[in-house]
Structures are given as C-alpha cells and as structure tokens.
C-alpha cells in the first residue's frame, strides 16, 4: 500500500472518528447523561493531533496512536458491557482498529520516503 492511499485512509477514518465522538458525547452532554465538561474532556484529546493528521506529518501519525489507544479501551469496554449502545461500540472499535494499524504504517512508510529516522551511531 502506498503512502498516499494510507494517508487518505487514515485521514478519512480519523475525521469520521472525530465526528462520531463529537456526536455521541455531545448528545450525551445535551441530554444530561453526562455533564458538558465531561463530554468535552472526551473530545479534547482527539483534537490535539488534528493539524498533523490533516497535513500528513509522519511524526504526528506516530504519536497519535497513543491517543487512539485511550479510545480503544473505551470502545472495547463499552462493547463488553453495553446492550443499548452496541452499534456505536462496534463502529467505534472498527474505526479505531483501522487507525491503530494505519497510523504507524503511514508514519513508517512516509518517514522512509522523507529520509527521517534515527541516525546511526558511528563506531
């Protein structure tokens, strides 16, 4: 898979996840199930790598995987315990799975294309 197709896949999946989380936690904040502050705290970590994800920065793609892990824990827990939000949990876990695989692969491939990486130690 080329870096261009991985970039498009990861960017589209990330934006879809962001909109899904805004809709889900925004709705729960508005209905009073959660407070709006708590709902906002669930959305803020996803906004941190937004600029780098949209521009294709390989470094951002590498560290954004750590943020995605937090949401994967949420999705897998919700998948295990819920009966009412099963569709949301399945969609969330599916999007997160694509990101957990795609983000590091894009960072690796694009980083090699740009010549980035750790410098070799001289002997």
Image (cartoon, helix red, strand yellow):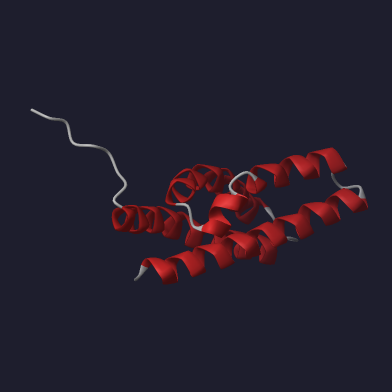
Which residue appears at 78% of the width and 52% of the height? 25
User: Most extreme residue toward the front, as rendered?
Assistant: 114
Q: Quadrant of the N terminus?
A: bottom left
The picture places residue 11, in percent across and down from the top left corner, at: 55, 63
Residue at 84% across, 44% down: 34
Please provide percent x and percent y for residue 98: 49, 62
Residue 17 at what x, y percent from top left?
64, 60
Res. 37 image quadrant:
top right
Work out which residue is located at the far left of the displayed protein and give it. Answer: 123
Front-lying residue, 67 or 116: 116
* x 62%, y 47%: residue: 74
As drawn, the residue found furthest toward the right would be 31
| Number of marks in picture | 0
Q: Is residue 72 left or right of residue 37?
A: left
Residue at x 55% of width, y 48% of height: 68
State the residue in front, 62 or 110.
Answer: 110
Is the residue 58 above or below the residue 66 in the image? below
- Closer to the camera in the image, 56 or 74: 56
**Quick one: quadrant of the C terminus?**
top left
How far across and down, in percent of the image, does residue 46 sit?
A: 64, 48
Rendered position, 105 above or below 65: below
């Amino acid at each position: 898979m080329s870096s261009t197709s991985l970039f498009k896949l990861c960017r589209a999946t990330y934006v879809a996840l962001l909109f899904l989380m805004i809709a889900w936690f925004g709705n729960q904040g508005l209905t009073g199930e959660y407070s709006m502050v708590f709902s906002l705290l669930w959305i803020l970590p996803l906004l941190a790598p937004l600029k780098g994800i949209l521009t294709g920065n390989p470094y951002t793609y590498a560290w954004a995987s750590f943020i995605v892990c937090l949401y994967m824990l949420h999705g897998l827990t919700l998948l295990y315990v819920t009966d009412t939000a099963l569709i949301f949990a399945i969609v969330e876990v599916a999007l997160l799975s694509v990101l957990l695989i795609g983000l590091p692969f894009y960072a690796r491939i694009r980083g090699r294309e740009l010549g980035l990486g750790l410098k070799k130690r001289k002997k």
